[in-house]
Image (tube, rainbow, N blue to C red):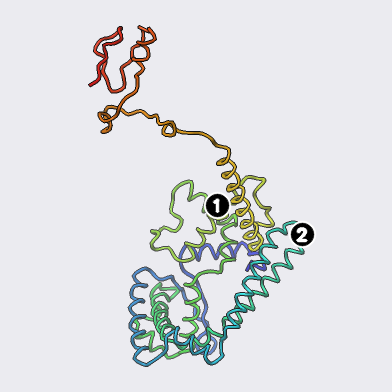
Amino acid sequence: MFLLKKLSYEELDGYIQQICTGSKLVYVEKGEGEEVPLLLQHPLPQDNRVAGYFYSKALEEAEVLGLPSIEEMERTIKARGLYTEEDTARIAELRSRVEGQRVILAKTTRVRARQDRLVEIIKQLEEQIEELELKKEISLEFTKERKAAEQKFLYLTWRGTLDLFTGKRFWETWDDFQKEPDYIFRKRVFLDHIIFIHGLKPEILRTLARSNLWRMRYTTALKTGDPLFGRPIRDYTVDQLMVLYWSHYYQSIYEMMPDDRPTESIIEDDEALDAYMKDWTENRNREAAASKAKAGKGSNQKSAWDHNETLVMRTNPMHEDIDYSDTMADVAELAGDTTLDAAPIGGEIKGKGKLGTGKRK
């Protein structure tokens, strides 16, 4: 959903620094209310490869313990009535209603109060969808895939948690991390790190992408070719990739013709803008299809092939196998024209100034 409050300059700058550096400062409570400052970092490609090893190993151990797969658990949930076909149908109905409200929102660009009411309806429908999906998600936590994923993210948490002042890992070794005596503290760091590496919310990224503070960096990088993040694309974090996606999206909107471009109030409203652009794209596609169909019906143009005529040069393999009609020189000779200096197609001029000397090979 859209942001409910406008971000301050300090908040915008903080998010931009977080994206550009791929790190975030957090304060995590430990022991008797002590807050520990930590620096969380996004994993590098090699970290993800090792995390994949931990996932595979944990999956094998979960199979030995007899934990069910996600597919097996879903069947059990349905059999016990914890999540029914009616719930699935209800979710599909709610999503259809959300889509319908967005279509109406796209056509409501003048009355701000009505826009706000439609956005609130969409928000309520999406909350109902999340509530129904949560019924299933809680049970899926006990599957072997989820247990393996937990082990994977524990490893990434150890690798990506640094001491703010030294820049070194907060837990020196993987064994130290596993033996952390304050389990609640470690759990809090784990949850903070998972939220961090899964990226910022879309509404925050979109607000950043259209802000002047970010667009100065973005447009300068486009014009100068200077890299935005100082690293190869293969090492981009999810936030870096997504802020570039939204930057391209808004850039294309700002470059639209004035008559087509939405107003600033619509651009700043995520739901309204998406609905507007969807409606605009559909209209353009319909116009293009109608124009193409009209042009196709009114076109009677034919090519040389349609008239059984074409030019075949001597380099063409078909040259020696074709029966030729009268050439330009033949026609000129019959008409009594003695000034034409032209070789018959497929022939050569042996003399110049008189006709009838051209011979075919």
Please name whichever residue, 109 or 242, is drawn nearer the observer in this view of the structure.
Answer: 109
* Mark 1 or 2: the one toward you: 2
Please name whichever residue, 262 or 160, is drawn nearer the observer in this view of the structure.
Answer: 262
Query: Which structural element holds mark 2?
Result: loop
Left or right: residue 214 compared with residue 54: right
Residue 341 bears which disc, if any?
A: none
Residue 111 bears which disc, if any?
A: 2
Q: Position of residue 241 (x, y in %)?
A: 47, 62
Left or right: residue 177 compared with residue 13: left
Image quadrant containing the C terminus: top left
Give, as a three-letter code, the residue at label 1: Met
Of mark 1 and mark 2, the one earlier in the sequence is 2
Q: Position of residue 203 (x, y in %)?
A: 59, 66
Q: Residue at x 77, y 59 (%)?
A: 111
Location of residue 71 with respect to 205 vertically, above or below: below
Residue marked by disc 1:
216
Q: Residue at x 64, y 49 (%)?
A: 261
CA distance separating discs 1 and 2 = 32 Å
Displayed quadrant of residue 349: top left
Query: Which structural element holds mark 1?
Result: helix
Location of residue 238 with respect to 339 vertically, above or below: below
Can the viewer see residue 109?
yes
Q: Residue at x 44, y 65 (%)?
A: 237
Image quadrant containing the N terminus: bottom right
Q: Position of residue 341 (x, y in %)?
A: 33, 12
Give, as a three-letter code, the residue at label 2: Val
Q: Residue at x 43, y 70 (%)?
A: 42
Left or right: residue 34 compared with residue 358: right
